Image (tube, rainbow, N blue to C red):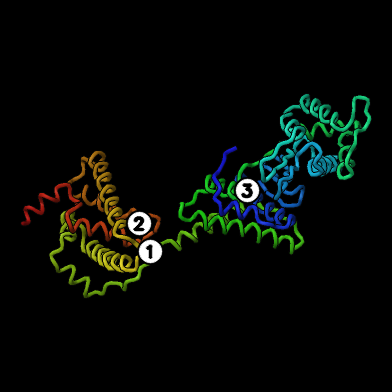
């Protein structure tokens, strides 16, 4: 199991005094999110339905997960730990009562700390019925001698031991052992959960923490609403996924550059059209019509004005703008090469017009900030005005002739 470095602040948080029951519930909520991250479309994760956490799989199988929260140096899976035997006893009762089936159920014990125990490890390694029967016999010797005499048993777990090692329950107990697995973690559970969230959720890095916090709160709120409505605390993966997509989209929208400048007036557009601007001449070289040139002027003016406002407000930096222009030039160069290879039969004017349309049609973000639709084409026009790029294959020669 991977080991994640935990900061001193996280260690202090995990070691503060939290009442066991409150912490146990918060662990259930966090672990429900942990399991939802690995689910498929028609699967459901439940809290306190078939177990602390249970998962109904697409293929009809069930995972029954018992969570053990440890806030001290205790070991809930030592050979005589009441927690271990109560868990196995409860699973045995659930199987006997038909709530869980040994053919389609995996029985998992999850600890939020790193602990080990001879019997728990022995059971976890028994992956077939023969090994399970052997493990049951070996574990039984901890509590009964070879003559079937009971060794000293603590009152806290005696009932569980006597039931699990009753010869009449041997077959069911061994089937549970065969499907039993033990999972422990060296890491703070919240860190483990966050690492898994980062690994699986396809979200921009700068949104990750906020989306994670929101989804954790959403699972808690959802389960609370279900409790209040008297319904099982069950969350369908489809519902979880829809919420994850929706909140990611919402945060993405918040991380966007908004148009702050007023729209250019008709007089401003006319003045720009009448001025000897190179970016307008570039469009004339590829035989763009009047409407295209008016749209280009509007995009150019809007991009230029808003870029100045964003820079002054600190929304974007000069470094980001420089990197953005370099990215636009790189995209322009690549598209130009592709068109040269794939459209050699086109006239130079049509090649240039195609290059222009492909560039202006692709919106390019500034870092992780989405930009308004006019910004990318407006910046392309600014670059073409500086002759850093051009639409016509021979735009440099054409400008030299103009001079």
Front residue (pair 285, 49): 49
Quarter-of-image position of residue 127: top right
Q: Residue 283: tell me if it is visible.
A: no
Q: Which residue is mark 1?
A: 257
**Label 2 neighbourhood size at 10 Å, few (<14), some (14-19), many (20+)?**
some
- Quadrant placement of the C terminus: bottom left
Q: Which mark is residue 189?
A: 3
Q: Which residue is mark 2?
A: 366
Mark found first going from the N terminus, 1 or 3 = 3
Percent x, y for residue 212? Answer: 55, 55
Q: Nearer the viewer, mark 1 or mark 3?
A: 3
Question: For the residue labelled by badge 1, is the local secondary structure a helix, a strand or a loop?
Answer: loop
Pick the residue in front: 72 or 65.
72
Q: Is residue 78 above or below residue 358?
A: above
Q: Picture coordinates of residue 94 (x, y %)?
A: 83, 43
Q: Nearer the viewer, mark 3 or mark 2?
A: 3
Q: Are marks 1 and 2 in contact (CB under 8 Å)?
A: yes
**Residue at left offset 25%, top offset 56%:** 380
Question: Nearer the N terminus, badge 1 or badge 2?
Answer: 1
């Amino acid at each position: 199991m991977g080991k994640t470095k935990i900061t001193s602040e996280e260690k202090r948080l995990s070691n503060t005094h939290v009442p066991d029951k409150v912490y146990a519930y918060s662990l259930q909520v966090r672990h429900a999110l942990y399991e939802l991250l690995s689910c498929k479309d028609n699967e459901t994760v439940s809290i306190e339905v078939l177990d602390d956490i249970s998962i109904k799989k697409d293929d009809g199988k069930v995972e029954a997960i018992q969570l053990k929260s440890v806030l001290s140096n205790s070991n809930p899976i030592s050979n005589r730990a009441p927690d271990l035997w109560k868990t196995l006893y409860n699973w045995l009762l659930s199987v006997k009562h038909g709530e869980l089936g040994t053919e389609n159920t995996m029985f998992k014990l999850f600890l939020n700390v790193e602990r080990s125990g001879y019997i728990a490890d022995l059971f976890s390694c028994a992956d077939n019925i023969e090994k399970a029967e052997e493990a049951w016999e070996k574990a039984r010797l901890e509590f009964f001698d070879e003559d079937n005499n009971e060794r000293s048993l603590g009152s806290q777990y005696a009932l569980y031991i006597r039931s699990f090692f009753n010869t009449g329950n041997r077959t069911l107990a061994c089937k549970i052992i065969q499907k039993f697995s033990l999972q422990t973690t060296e890491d703070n559970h919240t860190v483990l959960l966050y690492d898994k969230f980062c690994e699986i959720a396809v979200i921009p890095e700068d949104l990750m923490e906020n989306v994670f916090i929101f989804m954790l709160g959403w699972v808690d709120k959802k389960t609370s609403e279900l409790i209040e409505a008297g319904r099982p605390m069950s969350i369908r993966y489809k519902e979880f996924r829809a919420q994850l997509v929706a909140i990611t989209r919402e945060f993405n929208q918040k991380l966007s550059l908004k148009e702050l400048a007023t729209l250019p007036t008709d007089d401003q557009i006319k003045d720009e059209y009448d001025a000897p601007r190179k970016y307008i001449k570039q469009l004339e070289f590829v035989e763009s019509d009047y409407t295209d040139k008016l749209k280009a002027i509007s995009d150019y003016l809007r991009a230029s004005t808003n870029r100045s406002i964003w820079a002054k407000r600190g929304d974007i930096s000069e470094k980001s703008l420089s990197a953005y222009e370099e990215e636009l030039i790189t995209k322009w160069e690549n598209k130009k090469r592709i068109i040269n290879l794939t459209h050699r039969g086109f006239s130079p004017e049509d090649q240039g017009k195609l290059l222009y349309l492909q560039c202006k049609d692709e919106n390019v973000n500034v870092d992780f900030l989405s930009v308004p639709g006019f910004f990318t084409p407006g910046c392309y026009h600014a670059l073409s005005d500086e002759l850093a790029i051009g639409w016509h294959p021979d735009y440099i020669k054409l400008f030299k002739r103009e001079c």
